[in-house]
Image (cartoon, rainbow, N blue to C red):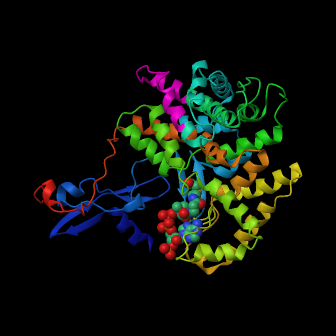
Amino acid sequence: MTPETRQQALAGATLTYDGRELALPVVRGTEDEVALDIEKLRGATGAITLDPGFGNTGSCRSAITFIDGEKGILRYRGYPIDELAERSTFLEVAWLLINGELPNRAQLSAFTGDVTHHTLLHESFRRFFEALPKDAHPMPVCAAAVAALATFYQEPETDKKMSETAVRLIAKMPTLAAYSYKHSIGQPFMYPRNSLDYSATFLHMMFATPCEDGDPDPLLAKTLDLLLILHADHEQNCSTSTVRTVGSSGANLFASISAGISALWGPLHGGANQQVIEMLEKIEAEGGDVQVFVNRAKDKKDNSRLMGFGHRVYKNYDPRAQVLKRSCTEVLNRLGIRSRQLEIAMKLEEIALKDDYFISHKLYPNVDFYSGIIYKALGIPVNMFTVMFAIGRMPGWIAQWLEMRHDPATRIARPRQIYTGAVKRPYVEMERRGT
Ligand code: CMC
């Protein structure tokens, strides 16, 4: 397209339907993304749009995260993900996402202090965990626990209260997650330790016991912090859209985020990191023949997919996977761990990236492809992997929810449908319904 024709295309679009014409205004983002505004469509034509999975639908304007899936770009508030991963901490990134700017020294210190002082759970919360079966998956436990937090903080939602809720959620999520794990293995809960940083406290609550209470390995804590940064936001994905949708009804932040955790649990979303490790374990147990598995993932009659591959938005290498691949090798080398699963993952990637099916479908490794291998090296049990994603995504969910709440354009989320059921028919009495 020449610059002139492009300028014309951006001037506006016209939709012709049933003999009528409707001008569709063009909306442009700061990175030149283009949307056709269809707000007047139904009123003017009686028609709606049909877009299963919302692949072509923008649900909001947002200033938080930018992704260019074709180029493999991810930025939080304008900052490239690889720079944040290398140079910042998770709490710095949380502040950035929520407030729009990197914190100065005083702001970061005050925020860190606030988060640190809200990590404790009310003592009566222990009974919440005791009521659940020991083998409960930690994701529904965390979703229920976050919803239950709303029963402890029931004050009306002023701006000040919403900020406090945001701090409480970031602070208490690791405690809830670690307690759900301790409950599942029958060990006593460990209180957070205020002298440790955010990620180290979590490792302490997960792995220390009253009998053995050393300091967590700083390398492991730093690696965990990196993972949390990479997961912190990803614009309008399934769980974030859920958080916004629930919040658009006026539901509070605890309830909205609890719904987001449930959405994240699914194997096509955050649950994929657990599925990747299970896939690698299966390939290892079956003798390590990677090609057989790649063939099955391509076979339409077989419903296996190459987990950790493909993405709705990225049609190029997911930049988070690139950071994680580097970190995976570094961490395993420094810990002196030889991982057969990392070898299998690298082989899988090598074969898939040269395979016509994966090339033509633009399927590349996503964030979940390497994260499970690192979580394993950190000692995190497989069924906690998605919980780790939820801890990381918390500031993103909060930032998106607050943006939705403060946006005057927000309306209750209420999509339409095309009805395909029976047309009007008379009620059938029981004796005439057959057997
Ligand atoms: N392995 C084999 N084929 C695949 C895969 C895969 N992992 N992913 C997509 N395809 C094929 C799919 O069969 C379809 O082929 P065809 O057009 O020939 O019928 C085509 O690619 C498009 O797939 P889709 O399911 O329509 O794409 P989508 O955008 O709706 O789904 C996805 C995106 C992430 C759900 C999908 O790629 C997938 O299931 N990947 C595996 C699960 C996974 O790793 N999820 C984590 C996503 S990243 C973390 C997050 O943000 O949640």
Q: Is residue 148 rendered magenta in the image?
A: yes
Which SS does the magenta portion mostly show?
Answer: helix
- Classify residue 362 by image quadrant: bottom right
Q: Nearer the viewer, residue 278 or 430?
A: 430
Q: Is residue 208 visible?
A: yes
Q: Nearer the viewer, residue 262 or 96?
A: 262
* Ligand 1, image quadrant it occupies: bottom right
Could you say where residue 119 lies in the image, as x and y percent from the top left? 64, 25
Could you say where residue 93 lies in the image, as x and y percent from the top left? 63, 39
How many marks are shown on the rendered structure?
0
Q: Is residue 69 visible?
A: no
Q: Is residue 35 left or right of residue 63?
A: left
- Is 368 situated above or below 108? below
- Is 384 situated above or below 297? above
Q: Which residue is pictured at 67% across the width and 38% down the height?
A: 90
Residue found farthest to the right? 336
Q: Nearer the viewer, residue 12 or 287?
A: 287
Which range is magenta? 143-167
* The C terminus - image quarter: bottom left
Q: Is residue 266 rendered magenta in the image?
A: no
- Is 287 situated above or below 319? below
Could you say where residue 258 lies in the image, as x and y percent from the top left? 49, 37
Q: Nearer the viewer, residue 6 or 24?
A: 24
Residue found farthest to the bottom? 356
Q: Is residue 12 left or right of residue 4?
A: left
Q: Which residue is pictured at 40% across the width and 54% down the height?
A: 58
Q: Which residue is pictured at 64% across the width and 54% down the height?
A: 273
* The N terminus - image quarter: bottom left
Q: Which residue is pictured at 25% across the width and 59% down the height?
A: 48
Could you say where residue 68 lies in the image, as x and y percent from the top left? 54, 59
